Every structure is written in C-alpha cells, then in structure tokens.
Image (cartoon, coloured by chain):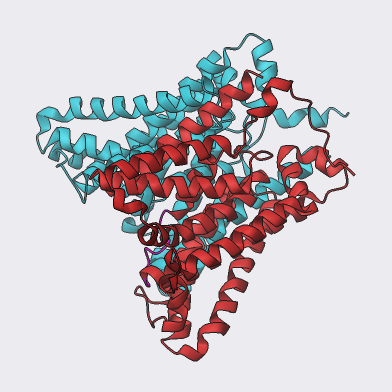
Chain colours: A red, B cyan
C-alpha cells in the first residue's frame, strides 16, 4: 500500500530533486581537494582514519537529528543530553571496570527515556518541539549540575573509554581503524535499513504531510515519538564515544545540537520534514567537520564556528526555499 | 452558533493575572512559613528589576509572535547591545545618547535582517532567527572573552538604580513601552494589520495588507525592544557582557512569558498586557525561589518544567476551544 500520493514532478526536476545526496557529495569532494592542497598528509590513511573516528559522534547525532527533523520536529536537547550522559557515566562507573557494561546499557536506556519524554510532551501535550526540547535542555543541565554539586565526579573505566579512543591495529592498507568508526558504520547501516523499511517511509510521510499520513491510518504521534527516541539513543551512543575520546566535562556536549542541525540542513534535508535522506544528513556532518578542519589549517579562530554554522543554515535554507518556490 | 460564542473577541482580564495573584499568595505563605518575608522593600525592588529586563524582551517578542513569527535571536541581540552601548560610552556621560542610539540602531539592523530573511527569503522564522543568532554568537565568541566597556555613571544612576518608592525607573519605562505597544496594537492600522497577518496571512494579503512590510516592521520593533533590554542590563551591570543574554535565557523565557500571557504561539490573538502578566509571574516565581534559597541548579530544573508545563496548559486550552 502506498501511504502518500506524491505530487508528480516535471521530468527535468526528477534528476536534481531536492534532498538527493549529489550536492553534498560534490561539496565534500571540493573540500577534500582543498584540504589535499593545503595539507596533503591529512589524506594519508592513518590521519584520515583518525579524523573519521573523531567525527563519529557528530555524525551519529546528525543521524539522530535527521529522524526528528524529517518527521517535522526539532530536537534541541541532544547537546545537553550528551553532557548529562558523560557526567552520569563517570559518576556511576567511578573507575570500576566491572560496571562498564551495565552503565552502557543504562545510558542507552536513559537516552531512550529522554527521547520518549520529549516525544510524548511534543505529540500528546501539543507543546512545540523547540520549547519541549529547550525546556529539556534546561532540566538536564540543571539536574546534572545539581546531582554532581557543580563539578564532575568519579571517572570512566578504561573499558568504557576504549570505544572512543582505541582502534583495531595493523589493518592492511588502512593502518589503524578506530572502534568509533566501526560503531559509526554499524549505526549507519542500521539507519539506512530503518529508512528503507515501512517505518522509514511512514516517518517521511508524517513529516511531508501529517494530515494525509493520519488519514491513511498512520499514528502520527507514535511515529514522531519513536523519532525522538531514536535521537535520544543516537545521543547516548555519541556520548559513549565522546566521553571515551575527550573525557569528562560539563562542556562535553555544548553546542552539539546546533552542529547536528547544521549538518542535517547541509545534507539537503528540508527543515519542516518530509524530504531528504539519512545518508545525506550524515555526509552533511562529515562535510561540516571537514570544513572545520580546513578552517583550522588556515588558522581561522575556532570561535567562529557558530558564525559558520549560522551562515550555512541560512544559506542552505534560503537556497531550498527559493528552489521549491520556483516549482 | 449562539451570540455568546462571538463574545470572546473582547477578552476580559487574561487568566494570567489570576495565576499571578495565586502564585504570590502561595509564595507569600510558603516564604512566611520558612521564616522570611516576600514583600519587603528589597525583594519587591529586585522582583521588579528582573521583570523589567525580561519585560522589554517579552513585549517585543509578543509583537512578532502575534504576527505569526518568532525571534530566537533576542538573547544574542541583548548581549550585543550591552557591548555596543558600554563600549561606546566608555564611562563618559557625554557619549550617553549616541551610545544608546547606536545600540538601538545595531539591534534594529539585526531585526531588519531577521525580517527580510523571514519575508523575502521565506525562511521559517525559527530557523532564520536561530541562524542569525548563531552568526551573532560566533561574533561575540571570537571577539570577547569577558565583560568589556564601561557604562556611563549617569545611566547607571538613572536607568540602573533610580527608583520611585519601591518601583524602579526601569519598570516604569517597561510600563511606558507596554502602553505604547498596547496603543499600537489596538488603535493603529499597523497593529490591526499585524494581528490580521498572524491570524491568516492569505486572508490578510487578499484584504490588501502588505504582509511582508508588516512582518519586517514587527521584527525591527522586536529587536529594538531586545536592544533596549541590553541597554538596561548594561546600566545594571556597569559594563557590556557578551553572555548575559544567553545565560539569562531571554530567548526561551520571553517566549514562555508571551505564551503564559495568553498570546497564541501560532499568532493572531493575544496582547502585550497579558505578556507583562506572564513576565511578572515568572519574576515572582524567581523571587520566591530566591527567598527560599533554592539551589541555583534546582531552580533551573524547575524553570524548564514550568515553561514546558505552562505551554502545555495553554496548548490544551486552545485545543479545547478549537474543538468546541
């Protein structure tokens, strides 16, 4: 059964349909060439592998954000969720290796729970998602500070940190492959499979036109809530990698929500939902990280990141707005 | 359809003032039991100061929300305005007026940009103002590490700390701004057009309203109000502060105050008087917590819960109205 009747597009539009991954691939290649000119050693397998490992958390967050955005909502709580997860993990593990796996499971459950609450408040209580998730942001940050009396306590075990900082050594051709990259690839495959399943189609249909989706028998609230849960889970995995890589601090997740949204928009996903692919969103995150690396090579201040993100969001959305209006 | 159903167009006192009275009564009792006093001179003064800062922003936010738009960049505009004002004054009273003028002009410029992005480029207001906010954040982050500039002593003594009895001058200014906004909304053509655009843009357009101009003007006014809040905060702090807007959560709190004040988040219905009620309600809760010496982090958790809950209550109410 086809859930949503798509408007027939004029034939010449079909190839350059908005939301395809071609534009972002082109940008990615251009950036790679620029990086290659400036810093050829960056493209050597070892440094490229470690770059991909470093970028894994933001790519995961972009995938999580994609589910929420494509269903027509926003999740601004992911940055604070990552911070909360890292701080909670450190305090619960308290440097005891035996507690690693229980805590990993707990973090995943915690992420899913925060997503569930976000989703239910947004869909059942009809609170706009940016208010729900900004409110959740306040609650999570406040709660984490409150719980740890203003300074992170405890420590992560080496087993826990392994995911974020260790690698499979001595791989032919590639050198060392970070665990983070393997986790990322596994999640990416899962995400693509999910988007090709019935659920994925339903999710896009809900974002495209909630009313039509509802009339076709979709439970819109349930689908959107699942999207929020997926975003919470992605944040949990990202937090595990990030905590391992860069350690415990209250700044662990600061600003990541904006990074994720920028990445999703850059990947050709329409804000407001209904268009774009999860692969595009993840490539968007990779492109954004590459752009920051390039800025770094050219000695541009890291403080300008926000400005770059703001400019990308405005540009990408303006381009897609003028495109869709000329249809 | 009965005659009664036509009546709500003229709304009585918004429910927020009832909620405010109840909150103050309960707060007074709780603080009394705790061994304190909610309504002494110093708490009242600080409550009204908090209300003034948030109030300027929220009144401006009301205008854009009424027009069916939104402004998430206000927090950064406030920070920018404190810096522009304090750095231009640089401690001298002679530069007072040019500095305020420059701060407001810069703010208005940001509002113009917001407005043009929302109308001409047809970018969703949430995204457009978030993007502009990030642009400003990058500028502030890369140029300022901490407080900069010195507010002129004249401004600190007048707008910052001058008061009439227990009422700060800044709160009186807020009442004046609110009065002006009320007049504009209910008595001028621009006000009626703004509400019409927020209610149904297509109908407004077909009735000959120039939607774009009206919305751009609303965005400029909103940013001007945020700029004014920045000037006020500079007068309180004695210098420009690059993070004061975001740390004060002026974006989220101003939207919450507007919604609590009975204005529909979707636009087209509501007003500034209710917003001031919402601001006073949030400021009162803050004052009560301060009196009870609640942990600052716990306060933040409660703030998040209150904002979500308040919006949820109003969302339910509009749903019920739409259903009946």
Question: Which residue is depicted at the point 66% across and 28% down?
Answer: A15
Asked where in the image residue A113 lies, by quadrant, the reply is: bottom right
Instruction: Tell me which corner region of the image, top left, top right, bottom left or bottom right, holds residue A101.
Output: bottom right
- Residue B124 vs residue A195, the one in the foreground: A195
**Residue B156, position as x, y percentages in the image:** 19, 42
Q: Nearer the viewer, residue A303 or A242?
A: A242
The answer to whether any part of residue B17 appears in the image is no
The reply to whether the magenta stretch includes residue B269 is: no
Q: Main secondary structure of the magenta part?
A: loop
Asked which quadrant contains residue B201, the reply is: top right
**Where residue B103 sits in the image (x, y, percent)?**
26, 30
**Which quadrant is home to the C terminus of chain A?**
top right
Q: Residue at x 56, y 60 (%)?
A: B305
Name above or below for residue A162 compared with residue A67.
below
In this view, the residue in front, A193 or B9, is A193
A279 or A318: which is nearer to us?
A279
Above or below for B93 versus A132: above
Estimate the x, y position of residue A12 in percent, counting from the top left.
69, 21
A56 in relation to A307, above or below = below
Residue A164 appears anywhere in the view: yes
Q: Residue at x 67, y 10 (%)?
A: B207
Location of the N terminus of chain A by quadrant is top right
B281 on left or right of B250: right
Which residue is at a point 59% across and 18% down the rendered structure image?
A: B192
Residue lying at the far top of the rendered structure: B208
Q: Position of residue B235 (x, y in %)?
A: 23, 42
Q: Which residues are magenta?
A: A247-255
């Amino acid at each position: 059964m086809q859930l949503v009747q798509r408007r027939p597009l004029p034939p010449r539009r079909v190839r350059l349909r908005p939301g395809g991954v071609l534009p972002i691939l082109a940008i990615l290649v251009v950036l790679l060439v620029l990086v290659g000119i400036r810093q050829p050693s960056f493209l050597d397998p070892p440094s490229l592998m470690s770059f991909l490992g470093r970028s894994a958390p933001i790519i995961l967050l972009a995938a999580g954000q994609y589910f929420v955005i494509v269903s027509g909502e926003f999740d601004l709580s992911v940055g604070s969720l990552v911070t909360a997860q890292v701080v909670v993990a450190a305090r619960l593990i308290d440097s005891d290796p035996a507690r690693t796996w229980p805590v990993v499971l707990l973090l995943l459950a915690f992420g899913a729970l925060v997503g569930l609450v976000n989703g239910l408040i947004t869909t059942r209580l009809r609170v706009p998602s940016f208010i729900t998730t900004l409110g959740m942001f306040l609650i999570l940050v406040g709660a984490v500070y409150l719980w740890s009396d203003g300074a992170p306590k405890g420590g992560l075990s080496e087993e826990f940190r392994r995911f974020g900082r260790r690698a499979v050594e001595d791989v032919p051709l590639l050198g060392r492959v970070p665990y983070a990259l393997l986790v990322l690839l596994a999640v990416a495959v899962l995400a693509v499979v999910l988007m090709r399943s019935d659920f994925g189609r339903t999710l896009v249909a809900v974002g495209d036109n909630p009313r039509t989706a509802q009339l076709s028998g979709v439970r819109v609230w349930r689908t959107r809530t699942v999207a929020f849960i997926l975003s919470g889970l992605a944040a949990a995995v990202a937090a595990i990698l990030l905590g391992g890589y860069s350690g415990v601090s209250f700044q662990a997740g600061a600003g990541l929500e904006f990074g994720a949204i920028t990445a999703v928009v850059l990947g050709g996903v329409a804000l407001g939902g209904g268009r774009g692919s999860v692969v595009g969103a993840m490539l968007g995150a990779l492109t954004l990280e590459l752009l920051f690396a390039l800025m770094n090579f050219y000695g541009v201040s890291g403080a300008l990141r926000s400005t770059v993100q703001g400019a990308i969001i405005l540009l990408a959305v303006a381009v897609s707005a003028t495109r869709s209006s000329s249809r | 359809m009965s005659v009664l159903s036509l009546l709500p167009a003229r709304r009585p006192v918004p429910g927020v003032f009832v909620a405010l009275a109840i909150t103050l009564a309960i707060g007074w009792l709780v603080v009394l039991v705790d061994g304190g006093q909610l309504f002494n001179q110093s708490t009242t003064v600080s409550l009204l100061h908090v209300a003034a800062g948030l109030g300027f922003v929220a009144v401006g936010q009301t205008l854009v929300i009424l027009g069916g738009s939104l402004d998430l960049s206000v927090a950064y505009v406030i920070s920018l305005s404190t810096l522009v004002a304090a750095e231009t004054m640089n401690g001298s009273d002679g530069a007072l007026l040019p500095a305020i003028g420059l701060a407001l002009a810069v703010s208005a410029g940001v509002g113009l940009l917001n407005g043009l992005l929302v109308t001409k480029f047809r970018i969703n207001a949430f995204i457009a103002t978030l993007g502009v906010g990030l642009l400003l954040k990058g500028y502030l982050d890369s140029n300022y590490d901490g407080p900069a500039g010195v507010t002129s002593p004249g401004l600190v003594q007048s707008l910052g700390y001058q008061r009439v009895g227990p009422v700060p001058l800044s709160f009186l200014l807020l009442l004046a701004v609110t009065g002006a906004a009320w007049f504009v909304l209910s008595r001028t053509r621009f006000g009626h057009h703004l509400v019409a655009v927020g209610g149904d843009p297509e109908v407004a357009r077909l009735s000959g309203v120039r939607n774009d101009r009206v919305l751009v003007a609303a965005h400029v006014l909103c940013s001007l109000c945020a700029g004014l809040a920045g000037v006020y905060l500079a007068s309180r702090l004695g210098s420009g502060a690059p993070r004061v807007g975001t740390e004060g959560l002026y974006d989220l709190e101003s939207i919450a105050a507007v919604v609590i004040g009975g204005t529909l988040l979707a636009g087209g219905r509501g007003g500034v008087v209710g917003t001031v009620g919402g601001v006073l309600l949030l400021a009162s809760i803050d004052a009560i917590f301060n009196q009870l010496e609640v942990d600052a982090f716990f306060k933040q958790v409660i703030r998040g819960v209150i904002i979500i809950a308040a919006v949820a209550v109003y969302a339910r109410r509009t749903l019920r109205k739409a259903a009946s």
